Amino acid sequence: MRKPLLLLGGLLLVLGCLTWIFQARWPIVDVQAASLPKVVLSAESLAPRPIEQRTGEAVTHDYAQAWQDLADGLDTNRTDLLGDYFTGEAKVRFTQRIKEQRNTGLRTRYQDNGHHVKAVFYSVDGGEMQLEDEVQLEVQVFDGQKMIYTSNSPQKYLVLMTPGSDRWYVRCLESVPEETF
Amino acid sequence: MRRLIRKLCFAIVCAALPALSQKVAIHAPSSVSAGSSLAITTTGSGSATLYLIGPSRVRKQSIKLGQQVEISGQDVAASGNYRAVTCDSEGCVSAVFQVLPAKPTRLAFMLHPSRVPVSTPKAVNGTALVSDRYHNTVIAPTKVDFHLSLGGESSTRSVQSVRGIAWFEIGSRPKQGALQVVASVDDTAEPRVIQQVAAEACGLRMSAAPSGHLVKLQTDPIRDCAGNPLPDGTIVSFTKTDAAGKSTVDTPIKKEKATAQFEVSGPAHISVACGVVVGNELTLGGRP
Amino acid sequence: MRFGLTLLIVVLTAVLLIAGWVQAGGMKLRAERAASTPEEAVRALLADIQGHNWEHAYALLDHANDIQKTDFIRDIAGTDGSLRTYSSLQSFDIWPVHADATHATLRVRMNWSSAVGSLDDVRDWPVVRDGSVWKVVWPKPNFANVPLQVLPVNYLRWDVIGKRSDEFGSAAVDSPQVRIISMNAVERPDSVVIVGEVENEDTVPAYLNVSATLLKPDGSPLAKQDSFDEIAHSLLPKQVSPYRIDFPGIRLNQVKSVRMDVHPLLVPASADPVISVENQNVNKDALGRTVLKGALINQSGQVVNIAQVLAVFYDSSGKAIWVSDGYVDQALLPQAPVPFAVDIPADVANRMHDYHVVVNHYTAPSA
C-alpha cells in the first residue's frame, strides 16, 4: 500500500515541478508570441516628401511594436522592454512612469483595439516623421490586485518617429486633446 | 419634554442625513498648462487614497476626503491625459484632465546637409521642432524665423509651425563658404552652419612639360563652373599610355592644381579626370 | 627492479622522440637535404624556408653570384613590416622547366599563408651541379637604392574633432556623400558576383563599405553580403574605387533584383601617400594565366607596409565586368618600384577592353 502512494506522490511532485516550470516560462513566451496591435497607416496628405513603400511598412511595423512594448512594459513594470523601439523624450517619460508604477505598486493594462495612423509630416532629409494616431484603447489601472480605474474611449496621440540604423524609433508620443486633429 | 427630545433627535438626523448620504467625488480642472500647479478637490469624509496617473508620473498618497489636494507643477510637467483617482473602502472615483504644453522656449533644429555644392536647387532644408521647457511639443501655431547669412548677404523667412513643426527648403548660393542659418522663436535661437563647397570641376585642363624621358603634368587651377576652386585634397587621376603600358596616378589637388610625373617611352597618350569629370587629352611624341 | 624501471623510461623516451621526428617529417627532410637531383635541391631549400631555418637554407645555395646572407633573408622573409613578414610558407609545387647534366631550371609555386589569406608566388629557379650535389642559384635581389634626400611632404590631412552630441536636434555633421556609379551582376561557374564602382562625391574623406542584397522574384531577400576587402574602403574626395561582392552557391536565375547599400562614415584621413601604378600590361604569367602586371611607386616619404591592388575591367561598352585584387608582399619604400600582378579570368580577358587600377594601402603607425 505504501509503494503506490510513494509512486503517486513522486508523480505529483514531478507534475508540480513541470507546471511550475511552464508557468514560469509562460509570461516570456506570451510577450514574444503576442500579436502586434493593428496599425493602419495612411499617407495621402504627407508633406513635404512622399513616403517610400518600404519606409511605410517599416514605420507601421515599428510603431506597432513600440505600442506592444509599451503595453507589456506598463503591465509588467519592466523598463527594459522600452529599449528597442523608444528613444529620446518618449523613452525618458515612459521609463519614469514605469519606475514610479513599480514604486507605488501600480500597473496598467492596455487593451489595444487598433490604431488609425495618419502620416502628416516627413522631412525633406528623411530624418523625422510626424504621425497623428487615433487609437481605441481600453485602459485598466491596478493597485496590487485591485482595479482602481478603467476606461474605454478613443484617444489621440501626436507621434514623432526618427530613423535609426535598422528601424524607426518613437521619439515623442504625446496624448493630445480631441480637437487637435 | 419627550416631544422636545423627539424633535431634537429628528433635527439631528435631518442635519446629519445629507452628510451621511454624500458620495465621494473628485474634481479637477479640465486643463492646465504644463508645469503649473493645480488643486484637486474631493467630497465626502474619512480617509482615502489619491492616485495621480500621467504620461510620465504616477503618484499615490493618502488624503482626507473633503479636503483640497495640491498637485505641484513638477508632477504635471509632461503634457497629455492625466487621471486623478480617489479610492476609499466604498470604491473608486476618477477625474480626467488635460495638461497642455506651456509657451515655446525650446527648438530642436535640424539643418541638412552639413556640406552642399554651390548653386544646387532645393539642396538646403531645415526642420525646427518647437517645444516648451519641459520638452512638450507646442501644438499651437508658432512663428519660427529662419535667418540665413553668407558673407555680407542675409535674409530672413518666417514660417508658422504646424503641430510643432516648421520647415523650409532653399537652393544653395553660388558662392562657396559658410552659410549660417539661425532658427529662432522669441528669445530662443539655434544657430547652425552649412559649408557651401565647390561643385564638380568645370573645364578641367592639363599641360605637359617633357623633360628627357620624363613628362611633368600640371593642371590649370581646377574650379567649378561658378569659379569656386575645388578644395585641396580632391583627387585628380592622370593616365598615361605608351609602349611600356598604362600608368595611372591618383593625386590630390594642392593650391588649386594637381601635378604628376611619368616616364615615357615612345609616343604617349595622356588623359586627366576628376571623379566622373573628364578633362583634356594630350598626345606626346616621346623620346625613346 | 629500480634499474629496470629507469631503463624502461629511457627506452620509452627514445621511442617517443623517434616517433616524433618521423611524424614531423624528419625522414622526408633528411631525404630532401641530400640534393642528389635538382628537384631534391629545391625541395631541401623550400623545407628550410618552411622551417624558417635561414642559416641552413643559405648554406644550400650556390654562392657563385656572391649573394649575401642578409640579402637572401630579406628577400625571402620580408622586411619593413611588409605582408611577407606576417606570412609563412604553407605548401609548394615544383615543375621542371629545363634540365641538362650541369644546369636545370625549376618552376616553383610557393603558397604563403598570410594575414590576409593565402598568396601564390611563382618563380623560376636555376639549379647547378656542384660535384655530387645540386644547388639552387638564388637570383641576387635588386633592392631599391634611393639616394639620401629630403622629400617635402605637405599633403592635406583631415581630422574629425569635437564630440557628437546625442541630443536630438543639436548640430551635427553629415556622413560623406558617396554614390554607386556602376553595378553589374555577373554569373560565374559557382557563384553570382556583383561588381561596380563607387565614388566619394564629397569634399571630405569617407570610410565606406558596399553591401548587396539579392532579392527573389517575390521580393524577399535571398542573400546579403558586403564587399569585405574587395574595395578601397578609404576614399578621398572625388576618388573612385571598384568593389566586388561574391555570393557563392547562387545562380543568377534565382535572382529577380539586387538592392545595393553603401555605408559611408566620416573619418580622419591623409592625402599622403600617393602611389602611382606604372607600366600596366596584360600578359601571361609563368603558369600561362592571364595577368595584369605593373609596378607600384610610392611617391611619398613614408614606407607603405602593405599594399593591395584592385583592378576593374570594362567591356567595349564601358561596363564593369570584373574586379580582381592582389596583395603585394613587399613593403613600398619611397620612390622604389615594386612589381605586382593580379589574375584575370580567361573569359574576362577575352571580353576585356579596358581596365583601371587603384591601390589600397596600410601603413603601420610609427612609434
Image (spheres, coloured by chain):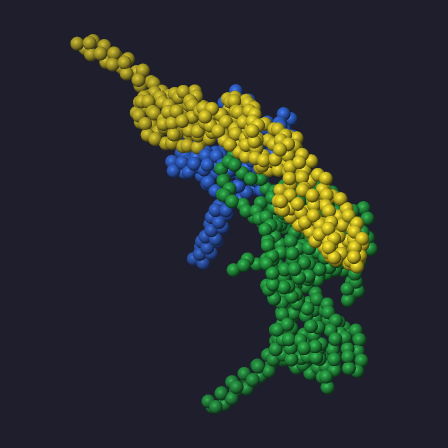
Instruction: Name the residue: 39% across, 29% down.
Output: B75
Which picture quadrant has residue B279? Answer: top right
Q: Position of residue C290 (x, y in %)?
A: 78, 60
Pick the front one: A29 or C74: C74
Pick the front one: C91 or C54: C54
Viewed as shown, does residue C78 lie left or right of C248?
left
* Depicted B209 relative to depicted A169: above or below: below
* Depicted C178 relative to depicted B88: above or below: below
Q: Position of residue C208 (x, y in %)?
A: 62, 47
User: Residue lying farthest front?
Assistant: B211
Q: Colour of chain C?
A: green
> How many numbered discs, if any?
0
* Depicted C267 relative to depicted B22: above or below: below
Which picture quadrant has residue A60? Answer: top right
Q: Position of residue C4 (x, y in %)?
A: 50, 90
Report the quarter where the N terminus of chain A lies. Answer: bottom left
Q: Colour of chain A?
A: blue
Instruction: Name the residue: 60% across, 61% down.
Output: C149
Residue C2 in view? yes
Q: Position of residue A28 (x, y in %)?
A: 51, 44
Report the quarter where the C terminus of chain A lies. Answer: top right
Instruction: Name the residue: 56% across, 42% down.
Output: A33
Pick the front one: B73 or B219: B219
User: Residue lying farthest left?
Assistant: B1
Residue B248 in view? no
* Chain that is coloured yellow in the picture: B
* Depicted B183 relative to depicted C214: above or below: above
